[in-house]
């Protein structure tokens, strides 16, 4: 899977986590799970609290791994729905979307962290954390902007978002 997204049955998934994050989470689970098994089987004198703490840590890492693989934007042409998927899924019909943009105002460094925002015609705003890499790099906002601009372009090709400006990122310096 590349960072450009992949297509399945007229549905395109744009991942918002880097491959490095996914590999790091999988590696951490694969490293700590055998450690827990070794503690339980070969070292029964290890205190119970340390085994439980390691078990909770592994549960957290498994949750983080699942969240890494499912964090993204889904553009479903067949159903006419745009979905933002983080821990939970928020959807909006193409006809309800007023604008989609990047908001990096709450960020300390506006090049490293941002939100993807969908403004709906009824006044609601749907937010999701933007692209994030294993280490906070300065190109994360640009990758989010690339995803949003491609989605805007595809929505305009379908006849939605008429009269919306091409500006994707709203920098506030």
Image (tube, rainbow, N blue to C red):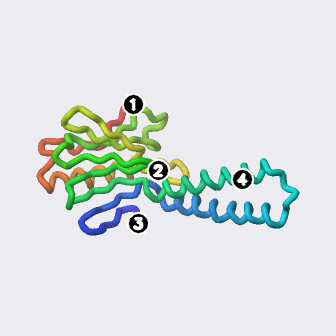
Q: Quadrant of the N terminus?
A: bottom left
Q: Is residue 172 above or below residue 43?
A: above
Choose mark 1 or mark 4, whichever is in front.
4
Q: CA distance from mark 2 to mark 3?
A: 14 Å
| Quadrant hosting residue 129 | top left
Query: Which badge, 1 or 4, is on the more N-terminal residue?
Result: 4
> In the rendered image, which residue does mark 4 sit on?
54
Query: Which badge, 2 or 4, is on the more N-terminal residue?
Result: 4
Q: Is residue 41 above or below residue 146?
A: below
Q: Residue at x 16, y 52 (%)?
A: 156
Q: Residue at x 58, y 58 (%)?
A: 25
Q: Is residue 97 above or below residue 143?
A: above
Secondary structure beneath label 2: loop
Secondary structure beneath label 3: loop
- In the figure, is residue 147 to the left or right of 132? left
Query: Which badge, 1 or 2, is on the more N-terminal residue?
Result: 2
> In the rendered image, which residue does mark 2 sit on?
132
- Binning the other alpha carbons within 10 Å of mark 4 as few (below 14), some (14 to 19) or many (20 upward) gives some
Query: Which badge, 3 or 4, is on the more N-terminal residue?
Result: 3
Give the label on residue 70, or none. none
Give the label on residue 2, or none. 3
Secondary structure beneath label 1: loop
Q: CA distance from mark 1 to mark 2?
A: 21 Å
Across and down, in percent, residue 111 comes to 43, 42
Query: Which badge, 1 or 3, is on the more N-terminal residue?
Result: 3
Choose mark 2 or mark 4, whichever is in front.
4
- Answer whether labels 1 and 3 touch (C-beta < 8 Å): no
Across and down, in percent, residue 104 comes to 39, 37
- Answer whether labels 2 and 3 touch (C-beta < 8 Å): no
Q: CA distance from mark 1 to mark 3?
A: 32 Å
Q: CA distance from mark 2 to mark 4?
A: 26 Å
Give the label on residue 173, or none. 1
């Amino acid at each position: 899977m590349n960072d450009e997204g992949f297509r399945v049955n007229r549905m395109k998934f744009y991942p918002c986590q880097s491959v490095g994050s996914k590999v790091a989470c999988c590696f951490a689970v694969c490293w700590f799970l055998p450690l827990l098994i070794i503690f339980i089987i070969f070292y029964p004198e290890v205190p119970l609290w340390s085994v439980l703490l390691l078990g909770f840590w592994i549960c957290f890492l498994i949750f983080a791994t699942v969240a890494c693989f499912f964090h993204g934007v889904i553009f479903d042409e067949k159903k006419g729905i745009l979905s933002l998927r983080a821990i939970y899924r928020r959807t909006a019909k193409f006809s309800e979307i007023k604008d989609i943009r990047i908001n990096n105002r709450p960020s300390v460094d506006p090049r490293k962290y941002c939100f993807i925002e969908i403004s709906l015609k009824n006044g609601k705003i749907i937010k999701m954390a933007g692209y994030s890499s294993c280490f906070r790099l300065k190109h994360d906002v640009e990758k989010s902007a690339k995803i949003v601009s491609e989605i805007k372009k595809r929505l305009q090709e379908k006849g939605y978002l008429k009269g919306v400006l091409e500006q994707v990122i709203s920098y506030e310096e």
